[in-house]
Image (spheres, rainbow, N blue to C red):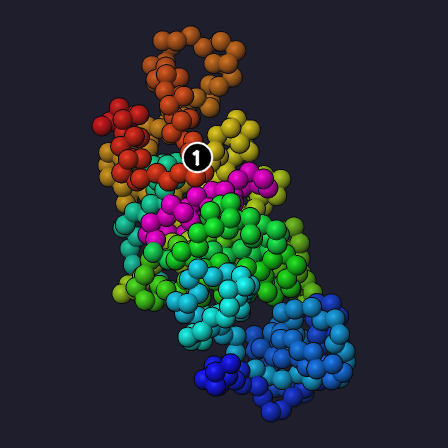
């Protein structure tokens, strides 16, 4: 290894001369004493017996005793092991060399393609963009998916949620957005998912193409702290490119696993459980992450899509409810549409984009409003139509909806391997609604 790389590696980690000791340890929390620490300080625990090392974060202080949540498993450690303070804090190395790579939350490569050099340290935890420094969302952000571009148009710097139950098609839609999005940089955070899904997502959903893409992975077998800070680390990577004036697509799967990680941490520290066992910290953590996305004056933008797993297709889930209140729009995937063979199964009537009206043309807006109205009429009268109780001519608008039913469903459908041009999508919608 070159001397310069060794020097950089050593200089990146500055551990204290003083040290504390472990006084109690269990599967989720290490209790220690003997150091002057603050909440969120990073410490290194070294085994006296085997010289095994791990790092953790100070998450609670009680007088001279402090509690550490480890980033990895604690097997092999015992009372009396030494605890050192990492004076560099919770920072990660970021650079343009991350493009095309698959890394863990500490930016360590897990794709077998060698080390990543020429990086500078960046803090994982940062304050969100100040309210008065946020730029107006006034540009269209095309994702290459007809149903989203045409009927739920996104803006550059917008934050949206993809809400769906298990097995409805979140990963497939995520892959379509990553491939079709009009963004020079793409950051994908896979948080708390099964390890098997990582290579599958890269090969099946992205076609193995990681050009201009960074994938940050913290799988379900990682510690709760790794899953929690994996999301923040991925957002820091996106901010690195945003600060260079670039427009970034950020996709995270999933917010629910991220909140579950904080639930494990919070309950282990004695926080009171609330709805579905989530402690208050799980809900307060969501805006700290989500509000870091957006458009900043004088810099670039982060357009973010956060997937939310709806357990039992219940939109009243506390994480789903909290997420909807923070985000600038929500895309709901329907299991019923999946059963009918409509992919991607975007439920237009239950979905909304809060900035769409401000960024599309008046003609486009009229077409969207008419499409939603006709689609609503079809859903409201579906039973009457199926049993033959409706007589044509009774309602001219419903007659039009029935005549255009197949074309409207065709507009909502798209092969997962294709991308749609935004202008062509809008033109098709205008023609379908007889507004062109």
Q: Nearer the viewer, residue 83 or 368?
A: 83
- Taking the view exactly as shown, the residue that stands out farthest to the front is 1
The image shows residue 305 at horizontal and vertical percentages of: 44, 50
Q: Are there few (<14), some (14-19), or many (20+) residues within 10 Å of tag 1?
A: few
Q: Residue at x 47, y 50 (%)?
A: 208
The image shows residue 352 at horizontal and vertical percentages of: 41, 40
Q: Residue at x 42, y 34 (%)?
A: 414
Q: Nearer the viewer, residue 403 or 217?
A: 217
Using the image, determine if residue 22 lies above or below residue 181: below
- Left or right? Give the position of 429 relative to 314: left
Asked if the magenta segment contains residue 277, the reply would be no
Q: Quadrant of residue 364?
A: top left
Using the image, determine if residue 188 lies above or below residue 114: above
The image shows residue 319 at horizontal and vertical percentages of: 56, 51
As helix, strand or loop, the secondary structure at mark 1 comes to: loop
Q: Residue at x 50, y 42 (%)?
A: 172
For residue 36, say whether it is visible.
yes
Q: Label 1, on which residue?
A: 415
Q: Nearer the viewer, residue 186 or 64?
A: 186
Q: Residue at x 62, y 74 (%)?
A: 56
Q: Quadrant of the C terminus?
A: top left
Using the image, determine if residue 3 lies above or below residue 299: below
Asked if the magenta segment contains residue 167, the reply would be yes
For residue 103, say whether it is visible.
no
The image shows residue 65 at horizontal and vertical percentages of: 69, 81
Boundaries of the magenta span:
156-183
Query: Could you tell me how many numbered marks the image carries?
Result: 1
């Amino acid at each position: 290894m070159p001397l310069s790389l060794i020097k950089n590696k050593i200089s990146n980690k500055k551990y204290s001369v003083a040290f504390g000791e472990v006084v109690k340890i269990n599967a989720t929390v290490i209790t220690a004493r003997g150091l002057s620490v603050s909440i969120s300080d990073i410490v290194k625990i070294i085994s006296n017996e085997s010289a095994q090392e791990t790092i953790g974060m100070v998450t609670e202080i009680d007088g001279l005793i402090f509690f550490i949540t480890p980033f990895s498993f604690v097997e092999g450690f015992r009372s009396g092991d030494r605890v050192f303070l990492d004076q560099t804090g919770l920072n990660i190395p970021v650079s343009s060399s991350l493009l095309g790579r698959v890394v863990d939350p500490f930016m360590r490569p897990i794709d077998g393609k060698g080390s990543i050099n020429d990086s500078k340290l960046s803090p994982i935890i940062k304050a969100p963009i100040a309210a008065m420094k946020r730029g107006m969302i006034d540009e269209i952000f095309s994702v290459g998916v007809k149903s989203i571009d045409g009927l739920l148009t996104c803006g550059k710097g917008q934050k949206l949620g993809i809400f769906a139950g298990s097995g409805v098609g979140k990963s497939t839609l995520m892959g379509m957005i990553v491939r079709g999005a009009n963004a020079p940089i793409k950051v994908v955070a896979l948080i708390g998912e099964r390890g098997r899904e990582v290579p599958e997502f890269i090969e099946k959903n992205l076609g193995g193409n990681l050009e201009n893409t960074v994938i940050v992975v913290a799988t379900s077998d990682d510690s709760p702290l790794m899953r929690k800070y994996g999301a923040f680390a991925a957002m820091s990577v996106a901010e690195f490119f945003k600060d260079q004036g670039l427009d970034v697509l950020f996709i995270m799967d999933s917010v629910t696993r991220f909140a579950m990680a904080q639930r494990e941490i919070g309950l282990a520290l004695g926080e009171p459980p609330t709805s579905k066992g989530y402690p208050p910290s799980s809900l307060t953590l969501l805006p700290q992450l989500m509000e870091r996305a957006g458009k900043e004056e004088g810099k670039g933008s982060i357009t973010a899509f956060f997937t939310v797993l709806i357990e039992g297709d219940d939109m009243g889930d506390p994480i789903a409810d909290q997420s909807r209140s923070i985000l600038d729009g929500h895309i709901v995937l329907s299991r019923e549409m999946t059963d009918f063979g409509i992919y991607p199964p975007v439920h237009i009537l239950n979905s909304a984009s809060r900035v769409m009206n401000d960024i599309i043309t008046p003609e486009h807006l009229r077409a969207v409003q008419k499409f939603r109205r006709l689609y609503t009429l079809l859903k409201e009268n579906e039973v009457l139509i199926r049993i033959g109780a409706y007589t044509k001519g009774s309602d001219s608008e419903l007659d039009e909806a029935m005549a255009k039913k197949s074309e409207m469903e065709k507009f909502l459908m798209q092969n997962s391997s294709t991308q749609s041009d935004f202008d062509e999508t809008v033109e098709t919608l205008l023609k379908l609604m007889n507004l062109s």
